[in-house]
């Protein structure tokens, strides 16, 4: 498997070249285009129960698409749903924790599981569940905006809506900044404090913040008398 990332960091797209018999697993709706010798199969990854777990608990798509090159090398073009960047990680029997909306695609050898974030994640803005990617193989992670890597050495604080992924060696806790007033009126309030040593990837834009900004501009239908 070979890949190239284009139009980064604003409107990233990934070209993945598959050798005969090689496969790529991607989120439903990620495919932009593909060569005619690519075979597409759609199924619930890990079976129906695993698909339901991801959909109900992690907020992910129930279905996963598998692209396989038949007879000759083929190419698949994939892109995330939101404008932003894509990063490539080559897992070597290691684990990454991914914000549920940031998984884009992976090799079939990468294991994906929905991980309980505990009560500490309930008010985090990123949901109570993370995706746990482990094993070996290529992994593609998307972001809203550009990706900014941070090497954590000790402690680091980040707004919860800007988290893309982090290494399993990092632990975290959710807490508020300031008092109750800042939680509801400042636009800040809930942050994630990471501890340990490892890599953390952030996104430069926050989908929740954008939704709040655009809310006053929504057309409102007048009530009829």
Image (spheres, rainbow, N blue to C red):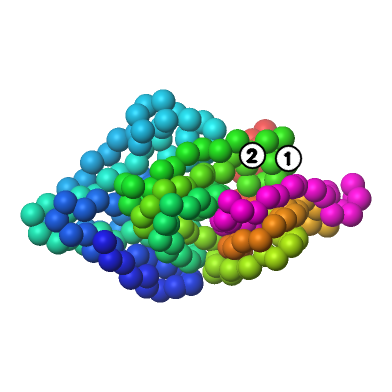
Question: Picture coordinates of residue 64 (x, y %)?
Answer: 34, 41
Residue 173 belongs to magenta span: yes
Residue 93 lies within the magenta run = no
Q: Vertically, is 77 above or below 30?
A: below
Residue 99 visible to an observer of this rendering: yes
SS of the residue under disc 2: loop
174 vs 55, nearest the viewer: 174
Q: Toward the viewer: 63 or 129?
A: 129
Identified at 62% across, 56% down, the residue is 163
Rendering quarter of residue 217: bottom right
In the image, residue 206 sits, relative to residue 134, either above or below, namely below
In the drawing, does residue 53 fall left or right of residue 35?
A: right
Q: Secondary structure at mark 1?
A: helix
Q: Which mark is residue 28?
A: none
Residue at the top extreme of this rendering: 49
Residue 207, image x and y in percent? Answer: 60, 55
> Would you call the spot at circle 2 few (<14 residues within 10 Å), some (14-19), or many (20 or more)?
some
Circle 2 residue: 117
- In three-dimensional space, the C-alpha distance between marks 1 and 2, rounded to whole angstroms, equals 7 Å
The N terminus - image quarter: bottom left
- Dot 1, crowdedness within 10 Å: few (<14), some or many (≥20)? few
Which residue is drawn at the image coordinates 36% and 45% (left, top)? 28
Which residue is the site of mark 1?
120
Whether residue 207 is visible, yes or no, is no
Q: What's the residue at 17%, 48% (across, down)? A: 39
Q: Quadrant of the C terminus?
A: top right
Q: Viewed as shown, does residue 24 lie left or right of 38?
A: right
Residue 76 in picture, x, y percent from top left: 25, 59
Relative height, residue 184 to residue 197 (above, below): above
Farthest residue to the left: give it. 71
> Residue 202, image x and y in percent?
61, 63
Q: Which residues are magenta?
A: 162-185
């Amino acid at each position: 498997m070979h890949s190239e990332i284009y139009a980064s960091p604003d409107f990233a797209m990934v070209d993945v070249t598959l050798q005969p018999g090689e496969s790529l697993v991607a989120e439903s709706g990620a495919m932009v285009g593909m060569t005619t010798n690519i075979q597409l199969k759609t199924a619930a990854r890990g079976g129906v129960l695993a698909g339901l777990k991801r959909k109900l608990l992690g907020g992910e798509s129930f279905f996963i698409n598998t692209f396989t090159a038949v007879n000759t090398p083929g190419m698949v073009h994939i892109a995330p749903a939101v404008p932003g960047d894509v990063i490539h990680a080559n897992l070597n029997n290691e684990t990454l924790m991914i914000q549920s909306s940031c998984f884009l695609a992976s090799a079939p050898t990468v294991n994906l599981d929905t991980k309980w974030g505990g009560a500490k994640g309930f008010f985090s803005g990123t949901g109570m569940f993370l995706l746990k990617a482990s094993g070996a193989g290529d992994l593609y992670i998307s972001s809203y905006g550009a990706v900014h890597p941070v090497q954590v050495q000790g402690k680091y604080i980040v707004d919860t809506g800007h988290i893309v992924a982090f290494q399993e060696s990092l632990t975290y806790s959710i807490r508020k900044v300031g008092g109750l007033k800042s939680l509801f009126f400042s636009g800040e309030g809930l942050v994630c404090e990471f501890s340990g040593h490892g890599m953390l990837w952030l996104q430069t834009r926050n989908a929740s913040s954008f939704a709040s900004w655009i809310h006053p501009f929504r057309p409102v239908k007048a009530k009829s008398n």
